[in-house]
Image (cartoon, rainbow, N blue to C red):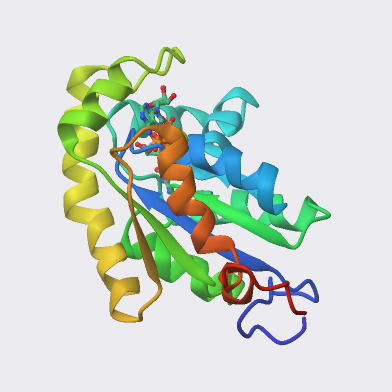
């Protein structure tokens, strides 16, 4: 086992991580798809990994499924393992981790197990009214996109996930995006978070 400092996975592989946070329906998955296309990251959605784990017939499947239906946050032990495995199996060294960390336990467990600190945190800011409208129109057949579970997810987001955003804000790591705008406009704001400063200087050649 090598050094477990910033950027190490608990072994030799060094990685860059950006956390993508925001309420349910704020557009995390949609914008991650755009970021992957333009900036060469690999997208790891914690929710997608958990849903794949249910489908795979894992012994934790029933527990995960019940927690998702209730809008509760699955124990970090499970989610961190899935994220760590996905990063180890990938050829890439740049990851967008979407929908994680969702509470303080997630945040501390990831940091302790992997030793990785995020480069920055993208935070999609959107009203509940708009998020509710989007979730009810999402049509992905998800068990948790019903009004009863949506209300529970909003409560969990306010009580458990926003404090994580505040934690990273106190470290000056949060890039807050107005996510209530149309998809293309949101992506314009997202892009500027990924473009190195020297490429933003209008009219100047890119200097490396
Ligand atoms: N800026 C936007 N304006 C309108 N609809 C959006 C926007 N971004 C995403 N959507 C739609 O809202 C729904 C939720 O988006 P999604 O990316 O799955 O959000 P999240 O991963 O944060 O829950 C999807 O149906 C998506 O097509
Ligand atoms: N870090 C995480 C992420 C998701 N989840 C579970 O998975 C559900 C769906 O997460 P998601 O990220 O796919 O949902 P959206 O925010 O994309 O709508 C959450 O409501 C939790 O029940 C979790 O337990 N822990
Ligand atoms: Mg999502």
State which quadrant residue 34 falls in.
Answer: top right
Give coordinates of residue 109: x percent, y percent.
46, 67
Residue 47 shows in this picture: no
In the image, what residue occupies the spot 72% across and 52% down?
40
Give coordinates of residue 182: x percent, y percent.
37, 32
In the image, what residue occupies the spot 78% across and 71% down?
13
Farthest front residue in view: 203
Looking at the figure, which quarter contains the C terminus?
A: bottom right
Up-down relation of residue 117 to residue 178 (above or below): below
State which quadrant residue 173 falls in.
Answer: bottom left
Residue 97 shows in this picture: yes
In the image, what residue occupies the spot 79% across and 51% down?
89
Up-down relation of residue 54 to residue 161 (above or below): above
Farthest right residue in view: 91
Give coordinates of residue 195: x percent, y percent.
59, 64
- Judging depth in this view, the residue of 132 and 55 nearest the camera is 132
Indicate left or right for 47 with 49 as reference: left
Indicate left or right for 145 with 63 as reference: left
State which quadrant residue 113 falls in.
Answer: bottom right
In the image, what residue occupies the spot 41% across and 43% down?
186
- Judging depth in this view, the residue of 118 and 38 nearest the camera is 38
Up-down relation of residue 80 to residue 14 (above or below): above
- Quadrant position of ligand 1: top left
Give coordinates of residue 76: x percent, y percent.
45, 55
């Amino acid at each position: 086992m090598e050094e477990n400092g910033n950027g190490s996975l608990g072994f030799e592989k060094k990685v860059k991580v950006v956390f993508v946070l925001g309420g349910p329906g704020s557009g995390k998955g949609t914008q991650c798809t755009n970021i992957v296309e333009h900036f060469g990251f690999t997208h790891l959605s914690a929710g997608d990994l958990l849903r794949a784990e249910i489908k795979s017939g894992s012994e934790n499947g029933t527990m995960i499924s019940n927690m998702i239906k209730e809008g509760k946050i699955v124990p970090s032990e499970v989610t961190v393992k899935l994220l760590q495995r996905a990063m180890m199996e990938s050829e890439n060294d740049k990851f967008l981790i979407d929908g994680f960390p969702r509470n303080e336990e997630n945040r501390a467990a990831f940091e302790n197990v992997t030793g990785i600190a995020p480069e920055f945190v993208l935070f999609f800011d959107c009203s509940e009214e708009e998020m509710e409208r989007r979730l009810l129109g999402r049509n992905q057949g998800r068990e948790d996109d019903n009004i009863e579970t949506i209300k529970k997810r909003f409560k969990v987001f306010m009580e458990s996930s926003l404090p994580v955003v505040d934690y990273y804000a106190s470290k000056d790591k949060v890039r807050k995006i107005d996510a209530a705008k149309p998809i293309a406009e949101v992506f314009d704001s997202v892009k500027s978070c990924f473009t190195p400063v020297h490429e933003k200087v209008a009219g100047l050649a890119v200097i490396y």
